[in-house]
Each structure stands twice: as structure tokens, then as C-alpha cells.
Image (cartoon, grey):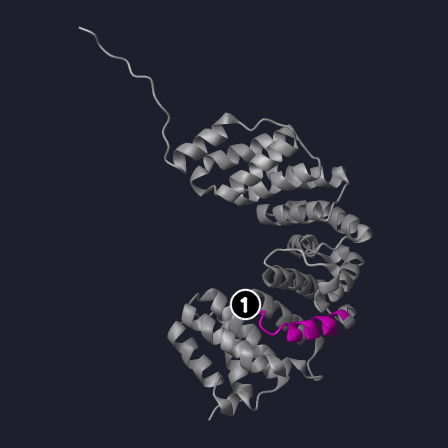
């Protein structure tokens, strides 16, 4: 008979080979949730199962698998409260909780965030950036994107502030993805640390050539949400959107325009380029993206192009304007 340790290694190995057979994954999940297994599983094995199964579910979207994933978090999560859990395991578990969107037992997440913040210097910057993103994501899910009063702030918010300070001293090690996660989280958590914001923004200008549109959008959105007021790095970062190797979705373009207008950056070339990109992809422009774009133009005291509104009304709403008709008179 296979035991809990062997099962945890099996699930972890399936991640490495990118296994996606749903029926087999369901069989494995069924075996894990049996009392014989859950009653004897160690904190390390619990971490391996939760982290690995979360990755497998992400790669194999299935409502049934997601139900099993939630059950695994419910049954194994308390094992992560053990004093034996290692910092890197706590970091990985935080990331898994956030990606799974499991907010039913936030006390466990609070414990993990505290352990990570106390041992941040023993973890690589990538892990810290993921943990900071996890705090932002859990806050978003817990509050439904509504800001909580300071008195009601969750414990992991204080830990997130410590992670920001840690990363600000290691900014030169951060990649474009790390920076996007950090600054998005600072914006979502409303964590303004002037030194950290300036340092991370400066590092973003140094890794611009590796930034994709979604990373630029998250970086600028985060900076705008914490009230960043230095225009020079913002303009430098935003001009990356003009490069031929960067392709922005309408959502990303609208996000950038919204962030720039909020920070008082009104570069005509950037506004024109991103708006033209949205018009070319009008079939993908949501009402929210259009609203953000119109807000950006209004805030920047610019007139939105008539073609943007006409294209959205015609292609998204199916409303056709009245056309002049000529008659042949006999």
C-alpha cells in the first residue's frame, strides 16, 4: 500500500512531467483524502501535495478537480501550522493558497505569511515576490476589491509591508515578472513606501527590454494606485508599449491609459498608439476597458477619438447609424 509520503512524491513528480490526464488525477486525489492518508501526513508532505495539486489543477481545468483541491486545502491546511514547516515550504504554500483562491481559513495564511516575513532573508527574491503577490491576491478575494479600514486590516498586511522592505534592498535581483507582482501587490494593498516605490520603478526601467504588455500594465497600475508622483520613470516604462515586439490586449492598453492619466502623464503618442491598438481589436474590448479608456481621456483633458466610440457601438452593440439613401426619380 502506498503511504502519504509516497503519494506526495508522486503528485510532485506529475508536475515535472506536466501530466494532465484528469481521470488519473481524480484517482490520486481520491486516495489522498482517505482518512488513512490525511491522518498520517506530515507538514512537508502536505505542502508538496497542496502546491503540486494546485499546479496540476491550473493545467487541467476541471470543476471536479477544483472541488477536490478545495477539499485538500480543508483537510491538509492545518498541518501547515506545524513548527516543523520550512520557510520555503511556507512560501510555496502561500502561493498555492492565493492561486487556488482558498480564503476559508485565513488564519493559516496569516501564520504562513508571518513565518515567511521572519525568514525573508533566507528566501530568494522570486519567492518573496510571489508571497507579496499572494498577499495582494488574498486581500482582493477577501475584501472583494474594497479597501478595509486600518483597524480591520488582516495580519498578513503587516507581513506584506515587511516583504516590500526586503525586496527594496534586493531590487537589482528582480526580474520583470517579479517587479510586476511586487508593484501590483503594493497597489492592491495600498502599501506606499517611497524608497521601495522609487527603487522598484528604477529597476523596472533597467529590465524594460524583457517586459511584456501585461507586466508593464501591472507595474504602472501599481505605481498609480500608491500615488507615485515621479513622471520620468513612468514615461520611460510606458514608452515600452510603443515597441514593435510588445502586443497589448485591449484590457492591458486600457489599464495603461488609466494608470498614466491618474499619474498625470498625457503623452500624445502613447495615448494614440494604445487607442489605435484597441480599435484594431474591437471585438475584444469590454465595457470596463472602454470605461477606463474614456476616464483616462477625461482625466488627461483630451478628447477621445470618435472612431473608438463609433467602432464600439457598431461592433460590440450592433447599432448601425442612419445612412443617407438616394432615390432615382422617374
Q: Residue furthest left?
A: 330
Rate crowding at label 1 as few (under 14), some (14 to 19) or many (20 or more) other CA atoms within 10 Å.
many
Task: Decide: is 279 above or below 200.
Answer: above
Q: Position of residue 216 (x, y in %)?
A: 63, 46
Q: Determine whether the residue tagged by mark 1 lies in a helix, strand or loop.
A: helix
Classify residue 238 by image quadrant: top right
Query: Taking 147 as reference, is 21 left or right?
Result: left
Query: Taking 195 as reference, is 87 left or right?
Result: left
Classify residue 173 by image quadrant: bottom right
Classify residue 240 by image quadrant: top right
Q: Which residue is mark 1?
A: 100
Q: Which residue is at a point 57% across and 32% down the rendered structure image? A: 273
Q: Which residues are magenta?
A: 101-117
Main SS, magenta residues: helix
Residue 110 on the magenta segment: yes
Q: Position of residue 114 (x, y in %)?
A: 74, 72
Q: Position of residue 54 (x, y in %)?
A: 53, 70
Q: Is residue 245 visible?
A: no
Q: Position of residue 20 (x, y in %)?
A: 43, 70
Amino acid at each position: 500500500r502506498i503511504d502519504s509520503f509516497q503519494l506526495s512524491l508522486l503528485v510532485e513528480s506529475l508536475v515535472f512531467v506536466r501530466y494532465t490526464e484528469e481521470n488519473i488525477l481524480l484517482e490520486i486525489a481520491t486516495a489522498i483524502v482517505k482518512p488513512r492518508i490525511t491522518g498520517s501526513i506530515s507538514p512537508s508532505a502536505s505542502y508538496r501535495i497542496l502546491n503540486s495539486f494546485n499546479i496540476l489543477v491550473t493545467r487541467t481545468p476541471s470543476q471536479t478537480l477544483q472541488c477536490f483541491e478545495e477539499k485538500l486545502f480543508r483537510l491538509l491546511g492545518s498541518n501547515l501550522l506545524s513548527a516543523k514547516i520550512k520557510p520555503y515550504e511556507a512560501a510555496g504554500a502561500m502561493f498555492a493558497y492565493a492561486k487556488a483562491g482558498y480564503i476559508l481559513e485565513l488564519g493559516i495564511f496569516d501564520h504562513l505569511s508571518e513565518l515567511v516575513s521572519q525568514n525573508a532573508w533566507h528566501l530568494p527574491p522570486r519567492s518573496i515576490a510571489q508571497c507579496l503577490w499572494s498577499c495582494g491576491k488574498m486581500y482582493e478575494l477577501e475584501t472583494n476589491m474594497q479597501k478595509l479600514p486600518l483597524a480591520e486590516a488582516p495580519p498578513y498586511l503587516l507581513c506584506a509591508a515587511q516583504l516590500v522592505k526586503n525586496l527594496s534592498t534586493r531590487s537589482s535581483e528582480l526580474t520583470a515578472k517579479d517587479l510586476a507582482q511586487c508593484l501590483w501587490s503594493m497597489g492592491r494593498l495600498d502599501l506606499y513606501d517611497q524608497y521601495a516605490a522609487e527603487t522598484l520603478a528604477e529597476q523596472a526601467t533597467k529590465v524594460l527590454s524583457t517586459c511584456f504588455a501585461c507586466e508593464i500594465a501591472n507595474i504602472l497600475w501599481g505605481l498609480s494606485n500608491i500615488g507615485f508622483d515621479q513622471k520620468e520613470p513612468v514615461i520611460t516604462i510606458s514608452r515600452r508599449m510603443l515597441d514593435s515586439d510588445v502586443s497589448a490586449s485591449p484590457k492591458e492598453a486600457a489599464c495603461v491609459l488609466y494608470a498614466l492619466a491618474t499619474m498625470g502623464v498625457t503623452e500624445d503618442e502613447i495615448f494614440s498608439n494604445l487607442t489605435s491598438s484597441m480599435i484594431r481589436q474591437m471585438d475584444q474590448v469590454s465595457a470596463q476597458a472602454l470605461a477606463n479608456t474614456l476616464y483616462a481621456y477625461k482625466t488627461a483633458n483630451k478628447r477621445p477619438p470618435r472612431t473608438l466610440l463609433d467602432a464600439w457601438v457598431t461592433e460590440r452593440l450592433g447599432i448601425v447609424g442612419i445612412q443617407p439613401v438616394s432615390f432615382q426619380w422617374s
